[in-house]
Image (cartoon, rainbow, N blue to C red):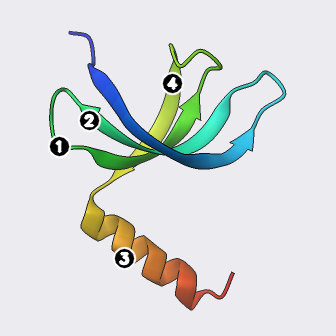
Amino acid sequence: MAIKFDIKESYGTISESPKGWKKELRSISWNDRSPKFDIREWSPDNSKMGKGITLSHDEMVELKRILNDMNI
């Protein structure tokens, strides 16, 4: 079974490899579900992706709180 995804919004690039793969923060709907925040690497044409992490809105709020507490 193929994984269906729909990129709703791209928030920014975290890093880029010499081969052009970009680690990005995006909002993605997986298999027609509600969009979630997603951090992973994407090929230059968005046809391939690496392993990543998907976060709900509440998880993203908590991650933001943690990062703010770290003062980075």
Q: Quadrant of the C terminus?
A: bottom right
- Do callouts 3 and 4 mark residues in contact (Cβ within 8 Å)? no
Instruction: Please tell me which of labels 4 and 1 falls first in the chain.
Output: 1
Q: Is residue 67 left or right of residue 8?
A: right
Residue under the point 60% across and 48% down: 12
Residue type of the residue flagged with mark 4 = Met
Instruction: Write down the residue under mark 1.
Output: 34
- Do callouts 1 and 2 mark residues in contact (Cβ within 8 Å)? yes
Residue 29 rendering spot, x and y as whole percentages? 26, 35
Instruction: Write down the residue under mark 4.
Output: 49
Residue under the point 66% across and 34% down: 22
Residue type of the residue flagged with mark 3 = Glu
Q: Is residue 22 left or right of residue 18?
A: left
Residue under the point 46% across and 75% down: 64
* Rendered view: 64 above or below 26: below
Instruction: Please tell me which of labels 1 and 2 falls first in the chain.
Output: 2
Tell me the distance, in whole angstroms, between the alpha carbons under discs 1 and 2: 6 Å
Mark 1 neighbour density, 10 Å: few (under 14) some (14–19) many (20 or more):
few
Which labelled disc corresponds to residue 29?
2
Tell me the distance, in whole angstroms, between the alpha carbons under discs 4 and 2: 15 Å
Say which element carries label 4: strand
Q: Is residue 61 left or right of residue 21?
A: left
Q: Nearer the viewer, mark 3 or mark 2?
A: 2
Q: Nearer the viewer, mark 3 or mark 1?
A: 1
Instruction: Write down the residue under mark 3.
Output: 62
Residue type of the residue flagged with mark 2 = Ser
Tell me the distance, in whole angstroms, between the alpha carbons under discs 3 and 1: 19 Å
